[in-house]
Amino acid sequence: MRWLRFVFRVLQVLSPTRAATLAERLFFTVPRARLTPAMREQVERGRVFTVTVEHQRIAGWSWGDGPVVYLVHGWGSRGGRLAAYVQPLVAAGFQVVTYDGLGHGASSGRMSSMPQLARTLRAVVDTMGAAHGVVAHSLGASATTLAMDWGLTVSRAVFVAPAADPVGFTLRWAKLIGLRPEVLARMKASSERRLRFSWDDLDVRMMAGRRTTPLLVMHDAEDPVVPWSEGAAIAGAWPHSRLVTTNGLGHSEVVRAPSVVAQAVEFLGPSAQPSSAATAVRTRSATRSANAMIVT
């Protein structure tokens, strides 16, 4: 990170425009995530499908038959990393669909964004059928909320470690690399022209108040990537929501924890009854591995 701060310290003096261009490319370039052998095996058992979004190929997989539940990964992740949900949901009578978002995993492209991930979800649903449910992790939950704000209908939703404030994350990232406010403003203006979207419209907390879909939010109290307060804020603003707080699972392990998977499957089932108000329930879980790779 020191060398990156040095590069921007020099480049912002020499050419603020070039600094903004470099910052935009770095910010929207997707890091690559790997699948464990077990995750890869589950993906290989799925039925393969593809859709096209912004002239890019989106790779997807499905299992089972019945009402469709979509698994939506977060930033820098991929659909196969949500493989823990496949068998329990299929056993519960659902068709399960996941995919690698634009610029992620086996899909084409190298850059992506929250609006583009929302467009990807809508394109996949248009191809694979109406969404009975969605299980979404981290920025995937943000993109799902945006897609719903654009008109996507979802009967029930489960958000795990959801990001409520992508703009705030951007400000923290800019501070981390030493980006000056005027250069960040250039970066934002350029990305808004490219994405045809305003950064001011990406606040999930504002969108949450307009939603009526029953929602279960699960977030770890010790999440080092997306603070627990963001999940709590979404649950607090979203009518007919419920908040479950875990301990010791962090950001990546929480989405695969057996207790979290079980609660998601139960909530998505036909017998689940939504709560009319956001409540907090604390559950004890296994200690997170100190060596777990953090992928948002």
Image: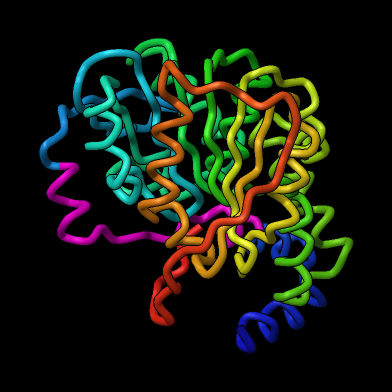
Residue 156, placed above or below residue 172: above
Q: Residue at x 64, y 88 (%)?
A: 2
Q: From this view, report whether residue 58 is shown above or below residue 255.
A: above
* Residue 31 lies in the magenta-colored region: yes
The residue shown at (66%, 62%) is 23
> Residue 21 lies in what quarter of the image?
bottom right
Task: State the residue in front, 190 or 156.
Answer: 156
* Location of residue 181 with respect to 233 vertically, above or below: below
Observer-nearest of 78 and 208: 208
Q: Position of residue 207 (x, y in %)?
A: 76, 29
At 61% across and 58% down in the image, what residue appears? 27
Relative horizontal placement of residue 7, taking residue 70 as reference (left or right)? right
Main secondary structure along the magenta-highlighted residues = helix
Instruction: Report x, y in % for residue 118.
Output: 55, 30
Image location of residue 5, percent across then percent down: 69, 82
Task: Indicate yes or no whether the magenta region holds residue 72.
Answer: no
Task: Say how the picture is coloured.
Answer: rainbow
- The N terminus: image quadrant: bottom right
Tally of marks = 0
Q: Residue at x 54, y 28 (%)?
A: 157
Location of residue 238 in the rendering, given as x and y in whole percent from the top left corner: 74, 30
Q: Is residue 10 left or right of residue 35?
A: right
Stretch in magenta: 24-43
Task: Choose top left, top right, bottom left or bottom right for residue 228.
Answer: bottom right
